[in-house]
Image (cartoon, helix red, strand yellow):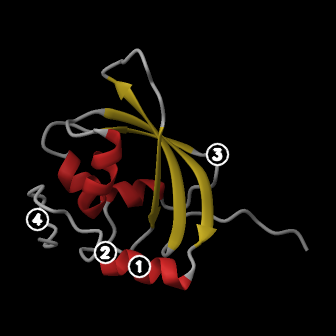
Amino acid sequence: MTEHPLTIENLMKITLDIQTVEPPVADRSSIPFVFIYGIGSAGITPFEKALYGKLAGDRVRLDLTAGTLCDYMGHLKLPLSKPSGILAPVSLEVTVVDVVRAQDQEVVKAMAAGGSCSDCGCGCGGH
C-alpha cells in the first residue's frame, strides 16, 4: 500500500523555510519555522489558511502590507518575529519543508505555551 504525502491540516507539525523577498537583501538566508497548525486560541490565522492543504515542497508567496502583519500572523507573529527579525510589512516566500502528525505531547506543550504574544499589541488575548 502506497502512503500518500501528508497535507497541512489541523494539529500537524509544520516545518517551513521562510525567505524575505522584498525589500531585496544581499543575504537572503532562509529562516526555519516550526509550529503546530491550528492551536491558536482565536482560531486559524490567515497565515495558516494560506498554508492549508499544502504538501512538502509547495511554495506560497505572501505580500503583507502596512498594518496587516499582526492580524495576518496572529499568535504566530511573535514566534516568527523573534528568530527572523521580521517586524515590518514584507513580502515572504514560504516553502513547506515537512508535514508530520504532531505527537500528543507536542500539541499539549504548544497549547500550554498558548502561542501567545508578550506585548505586540495584536489583540490575541495572550497577555
Q: Residues within 10 Å of mark 4 (few under 14, many from 20)?
A: some
Can you tell which mark lies on residue 18? none
Above/below status of 28 relative to 38: above
Mark pair 1, 3: CA separation: 27 Å
Mark pair 4, 1: CA separation: 22 Å
Can you tell which mark lies on residue 123? 4
Closest to the observer, 26 or 61: 26
Q: Secondary structure at mark 1?
A: helix
Mark pair 1, 2: CA separation: 6 Å
Q: Secondary structure at mark 2?
A: helix
For marks 1 and 3 on the same chain, the one whose residue lies earlier in the sequence: 3
Closest to the observer, 74 or 126: 126
Q: Secondary structure at mark 3?
A: loop
Residue at coordinates 22% horizontally, 35% vertically from top-left?
89
Q: Which residue is mark 2?
A: 113
In this rendering, the label closer to the viewer, 2 or 3: 2
Residue 107, percent from left and from top: 46, 79
Q: Residues within 10 Å of mark 3 (few under 14, many from 20)?
A: few
Can you tell which mark lies on residue 57? 3
At label 4, the amino acid type is Gly
Question: In the rendered structure, are the residues bearing label 1 and label 2 in contact, judged by CB atoms less than 8 Å apart?
Answer: yes
